[in-house]
Image (cartoon, rainbow, N blue to C red):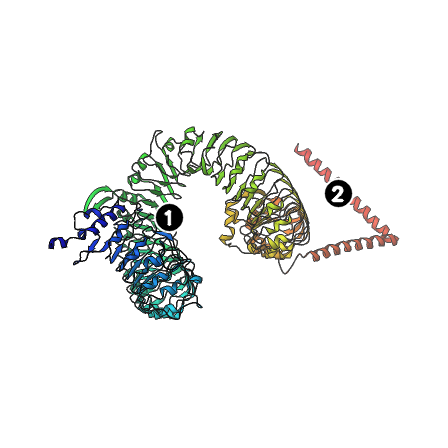
């Protein structure tokens, strides 16, 4: 009998077996493996009362991860046989969206009920009627559970109760978790919960709580909260609350844990938050709080975790926070905090501190070295400047440091050699940080070389110093860093070779339990691109078998790469050797050990024939063999490397490839660049659906633009320039709303442009120059609000400039030269197109005056109005071009010019500028009908390099201050009516290497100066009064008027009166003598007798001299 009492109740054992039959734990049998025998009290998950042997606890929670996809189960109604249950846990099962069984409410003794994440669902009726049986009514289900202390219905995302009145009977409830339920339709949920005076923990996370229905507005809040003993409150991820923090909340002075993250809370943080002095965890993450952090935060002396990230808090971290001496976690990510307090070092228990993505300025305080328990520190994406303090070396437990994208500077300290467990970037004095495992310092101003002691960092896993100013050679000891997984030195100034680094890493072997396992280890990622590395690529780089990404691009590496360089790179997925001086020399049948997804060998010589090893790269998604020295036809197999549905990027530009391209209809290119080759024939048939970039420029393609481009709805870059394309521009280009770059220049395209472009277009660059277009420029084309560059040069466009151009306020470059445009130059160009850098209206039919408003173009670098019919004067305001006054230009202003090319007349020649266009500043007003004197204000343009005013009607003198234009390289004033002397100050123009002042009325000596005497004499021709080198010497240099001497010698007015005086004197003297001879007969007779005597004397002398010569000549014979 006694033995019988030790067993569980038979009916309950049978019930348990029935329950087991419905539970599907096919992937985890550990729970039910013990469910054998007659004593169910010994089964796992089952507990019985020691005296009555009734089952009082049933825990069917599977031992599987929370995100595991459980197979569906069914809850057997036999559960109702367990009348004495006090503890029931069905969490983490999958009851396949079934409703919560109605018999749950019959367990009157139940104290613990956990149905979380169990796949229950069901709509809750809006009314309860007379509390009669309602299968989905939670009031009926739970209303009798008056003993319940713990209730968890969380993560049943399809449970939708209509109210929470059913909670009213649970007067003993301590823990309530309804997280993840849909409470959006529940009214007065706060009032229902407020009845639970014994509540210690309340979790309503992600419950879709509504402020307007929940009773938590100031007008509907209860006068007090009954659950004053509450220690845990979690309302996180209720994104629609959209309220300020209720003051009533701060009366819950027993709170230890408060999570209000992601609730759309706003306003300032109240001072009364300091009342919650027992708080250990406070999370206000991802809200819209603004203002400063209150000083009262310093009262939260028990706080261990503080998360204020992703708000709009500003100002400094208050000094009072130094009182939070128990704080271990502090997150201020993505706010507007401006300063770190000097007292930050008092938070000596701090282990994790995230201040990234703020507006912190100034230096890192030295007291940060007092945070000796710090393991994680993120200061990235701020405006921190200065050097990292030496005290940083005290952070010996630091495992992660990210100081990237700041203004940190200085050199890397030798003491960094003590960083035994480095995994990340290297800032300054980290010498004693023996536990550091993660360090990022990209995007700062770190300078100097890497100290040799970096080779002691034997546990270094990741080192990222990219985008700094570090120079010098790579330390020899870096090859000892056998645990290095990621090394990124991209975009620095490292020089020298990589032999020592590669030699060391290629000899690394795994080490396990102190013994050399012999297994090859080494970096996964090696990025050394965009430096000044030189020498050859060592052959044993092919032994780095763990490499998945290798980038050596944009250096000065040279030499030949053989098959040995790639011998064991079996894991390589990314290879970039571009822009070096490398040559690949492998056999025709070489099969690389890798199958890369990205291969970039731009400018690497892999030719002369198309490389057959490419055939093995069946996974390639991005292939660049541009400028690779490849000639001939592309083999047919190349187009079948990838499966027809695969998308990839292909760049074969700048080679000597030729022939006709096959149909590429089944090839899905995102980028196709075949520019600068010798392809011919019609454009290939393409699948344009995935196409984003197509560049077929500088070939010999012919025919019209195919209609299939109408389907290229994703295209952004389209270039067919420098081919033999004919026909017209199809109107479907107006519908390609993602198109940003459109270039069909230098072809034979004709006809009028379509007028269908509208504001939906994203076009930024349009180049239609050097074609045969006619008609007027369409209004829609020039009114595109995103337009930045418009080239229509050398076509047959006529009419006036379209008024809608006034809307193109982002326009930087306007080149419509060499057309037949007419009318006056509109004043609104200067008033509305304020971003213009280039304005080129050359060789058109424009008339009228030059509007002075053009000087408002403060960014203008190039102005070309030559070869028109403009008249009038140069506006005096032309001295106000701001970008031409200064000699140093903002790089951001002229960056766009690096992408452009432009024809400019300078130094007597027409030249196309492209790579150096950003350095050009030019004004060309040549070959018009401009007159008046040259304005003195023009010489204020100290940054101007080219000035061409030739072929006009300018008169007056060359301005004396021409020497102020110190950057001037080319000056052409020929074919005008200028007079006076050449100012001597022109000899101080040290950069002047072209001068033409011919065909004017200049006179006087050419000023002395090395450049002026070195110019060809033709530069001064047709100025009849000019003399001096390189022309003939001046006849009497001492009497010549010299320009700019003694306050205006040689002034034109004085010279003019001098010549007039000489002429008048000659005339008066001549007629006085003649009048005397005519009037006085005796004088007249005497005058003519004297003339006769003089004649006779001269005759006699000539006869005598002639006879003497004859006599001398006779004697010699």
Q: Is residue 1064 left or right of residue 753?
A: right
Q: Position of residue 397 (x, y in %)?
A: 26, 58
The residue where tag 1 is placed is 490
Q: Nearer the viewer, residue 45 or 601?
A: 45
Circle 2: is it few (<14), some (14-19), or many (20+) Cα within 10 Å?
few
Q: Is residue 44 visible?
A: no
Q: Is residue 37 left or right of residue 905?
A: left
Residue 340 position (above or below residue 892): below
Q: Quadrant of the C terminus?
A: top right
Q: Identify the element where label 2 is drawn.
A: helix
Task: State the image quarter where residue 555 is shown.
Answer: top left
Q: Please name the residue shown 86% across and 51% down the image.
A: 1084
Q: Is residue 519 visible?
A: yes
Identify the mark at residue 1112; answer none if there is no mark: none
Q: Nearer the viewer, residue 948 or 870?
A: 870
Q: Is residue 820 left or right of residue 252?
A: right
The residue where tag 2 is placed is 1101
Q: Are marks 2 and 1 in contact (CB under 8 Å)?
A: no
Q: Is residue 27 left or right of residue 649?
A: left
Q: Position of residue 224 (x, y in %)?
A: 37, 70
Q: Nearer the viewer, residue 594 or 659?
A: 594
Gap between marks 2 and 1, in whole Å?
A: 99 Å
Residue 291 position (above or below residue 1113): below
């Amino acid at each position: 009998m006694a033995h019988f009492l030790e067993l569980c109740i038979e009916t309950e054992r049978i019930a348990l077996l029935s329950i087991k039959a419905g539970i599907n734990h096919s992937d985890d049998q550990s729970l039910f493996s013990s469910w054998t025998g007659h004593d169910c009290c010994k089964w796992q998950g089952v507990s019985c009362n020691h005296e009555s042997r009734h089952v009082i606890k049933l825990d069917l929670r599977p031992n599987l991860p929370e995100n595991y996809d459980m197979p569906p189960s069914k809850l057997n109604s036999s559960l109702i046989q367990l009348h004495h249950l006090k503890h029931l846990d069905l969490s983490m099962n999958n009851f396949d969206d079934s409703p919560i069984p109605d018999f749950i409410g019959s367990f009157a003794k139940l104290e613990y009920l956990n149905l979380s994440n169990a796949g229950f669902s069901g709509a809750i009726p809006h009314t309860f009627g007379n509390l009669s049986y309602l299968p989905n009514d939670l009031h009926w289900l739970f209303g009798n559970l008056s003993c319940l202390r713990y209730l968890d219905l969380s993560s049943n995302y399809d449970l939708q109760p209509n109210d929470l009145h059913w909670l009213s009977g649970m007067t003993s409830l301590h823990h309530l978790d309804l997280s993840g339920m849909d409470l959006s339709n529940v009214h007065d949920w706060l009032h229902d919960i407020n009845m639970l005076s014994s509540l210690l923990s309340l979790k309503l996370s992600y419950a879709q709580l509504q402020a307007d229905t929940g009773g938590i507005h100031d007008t509907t809040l209860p006068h007090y909260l009954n659950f004053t003993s509450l220690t845990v409150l979690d309302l996180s991820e209720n994104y629609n609350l959209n309220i300020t923090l209720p003051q009533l909340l701060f009366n819950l002075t027993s709170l230890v844990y408060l999570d209000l993250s992601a609730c759309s809370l706003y306003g300032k943080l109240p001072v009364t938050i300091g009342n919650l002095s027992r708080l250990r965890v406070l999370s206000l993450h991802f809200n819209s709080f603004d203002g400063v952090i209150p000083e009262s935060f310093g009262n939260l002396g028990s706080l261990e975790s503080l998360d204020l990230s992703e708000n709009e808090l500003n100002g400094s971290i208050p000094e009072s926070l130094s009182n939070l001496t128990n704080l271990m976690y502090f997150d201020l990510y993505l706010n507007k905090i401006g300063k770190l307090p000097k007292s930050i070092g008092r938070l000596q228990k701090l282990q994790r501190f995230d201040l990234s993505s703020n507006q912190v300025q100034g230096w890192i305080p030295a007291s940060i070295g007092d945070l000796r328990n710090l393991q994680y520190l993120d200061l990235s994406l701020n405006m921190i400047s200065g050097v990292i303090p030496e005290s940083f070396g005290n952070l010996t437990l630091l495992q992660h440091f990210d100081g990237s994208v700041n203004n940190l500077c200085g050199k890397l300290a030798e003491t960094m050699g003590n960083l035994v467990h480095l995994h990340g970037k290297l800032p300054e004095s980290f010498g004693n940080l023996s536990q550091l495992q993660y360090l990022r310092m990209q995007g700062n101003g770190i300078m100097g070389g890497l100290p040799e002691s970096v080779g002691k960092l034997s546990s270094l896993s990741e080192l990222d110093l990219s985008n700094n100013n570090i120079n010098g050679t790579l330390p020899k000891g870096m090859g000892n860093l056998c645990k290095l997984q990621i090394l990124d030195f991209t975009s620095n100034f490292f020089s020298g070779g990589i032999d020592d680094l590669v030699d060391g890493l290629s000899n690394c072997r795994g080490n396990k339990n102190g013994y050399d396992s012999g297994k090859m280890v080494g970096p996964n990622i090696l990025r050394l691109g965009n430096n000044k590395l030189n020498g050859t690529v060592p052959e044993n780089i092919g032994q780095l078998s763990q490499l998945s990404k290798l980038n050596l691009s944009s250096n000065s590496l040279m030499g030949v790469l053989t098959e040995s360089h790639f011998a064991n790179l079996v894991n390589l997925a990314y290879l970039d050797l571009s822009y070096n001086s490398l040559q690949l020399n492998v056999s025709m049948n070489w099969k690389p050990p890798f199958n890369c997804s990205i291969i970039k060998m731009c400018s690497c010589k892999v030719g002369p024939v198309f490389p057959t090893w490419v055939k093995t790269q069946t996974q390639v998604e991005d292939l660049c063999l541009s400028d690779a020295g490849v000639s001939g036809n592309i083999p047919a197999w190349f187009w079948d490397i990838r499966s027809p549905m695969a998308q990839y990027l292909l760049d074969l530009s700048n080679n000597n490839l030729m022939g006709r391209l096959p149909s590429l209809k089944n090839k899905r290119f995102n980028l196709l660049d075949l520019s600068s080759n010798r392809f011919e024939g019609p454009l290939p048939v393409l699948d344009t659906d995935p196409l984003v970039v197509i560049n077929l420029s500088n070939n010999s393609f012919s025919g019209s633009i195919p209609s299939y481009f109408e389907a290229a709805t994703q295209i952004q870059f389209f270039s067919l320039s420098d081919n033999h394309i004919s026909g017209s521009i199809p109107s479907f280009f107006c519908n390609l709303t993602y198109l940003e770059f459109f270039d069909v220049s230098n072809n034979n395209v004709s006809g009028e442009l379509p007028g269908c472009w509208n504001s939906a277009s994203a076009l930024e660059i349009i180049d239609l120059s050097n074609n045969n277009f006619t008609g007027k420029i369409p209004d829609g084309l020039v009114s595109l609000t995103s337009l930045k560059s418009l080239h229509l040069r050398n076509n047959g466009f006529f009419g006036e400039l379209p008024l809608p151009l006034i809307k193109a306020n982002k326009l930087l470059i306007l080149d419509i030269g060499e057309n037949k445009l007419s009318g006056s130059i509109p004043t609104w160009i200067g008033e509305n197109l304020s971003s213009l850098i280039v304005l080129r209206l050359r060789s058109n039919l424009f008339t009228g005056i030059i509007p002075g408003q053009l000087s408002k173009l403060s960014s203008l670098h190039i102005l070309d109005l030559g070869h028109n019919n403009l008249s009038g004067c140069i506006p005096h305001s032309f001295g106000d071009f701001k970008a031409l006054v200064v000699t140093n230009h903002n790089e951001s202003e002229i960056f766009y010019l690096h992408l452009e090319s432009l024809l400019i007349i300078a130094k007597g020649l027409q030249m196309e500028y492209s790579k150096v266009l950003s350095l050009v500043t030019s004004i060309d007003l040549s070959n018009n009908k401009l007159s008046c004197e040259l304005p003195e204000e023009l010489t204020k343009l100290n940054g101007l390099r080219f000035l061409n005013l030739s072929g006009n009607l300018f008169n007056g003198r060359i301005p004396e201050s021409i020497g102020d234009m110190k950057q001037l390289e080319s000056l052409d004033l020929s074919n005008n009516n200028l007079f006076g002397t050449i100012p001597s100050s022109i000899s101080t123009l040290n950069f002047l290497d072209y001068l033409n002042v011919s065909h004017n009325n200049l006179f006087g000596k050419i000023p002395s100066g090395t450049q002026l005497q070195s110019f060809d004499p033709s530069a001064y021709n047709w100025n009849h009064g000019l003399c001096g080198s390189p022309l003939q010497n001046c006849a009497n240099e001492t009497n010549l008027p010299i320009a700019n001497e003694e306050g205006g010698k040689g002034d034109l007015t004085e010279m003019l009166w001098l010549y007039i005086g000489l002429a008048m004197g000659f005339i008066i003297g001549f007629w006085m003598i003649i009048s005397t001879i005519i009037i006085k007969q005796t004088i007249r007779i005497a005058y003519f007798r004297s003339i006769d005597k003089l004649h006779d004397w001269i005759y006699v002398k000539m006869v005598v001299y002639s006879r003497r010569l004859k006599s001398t000549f006779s004697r010699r014979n």
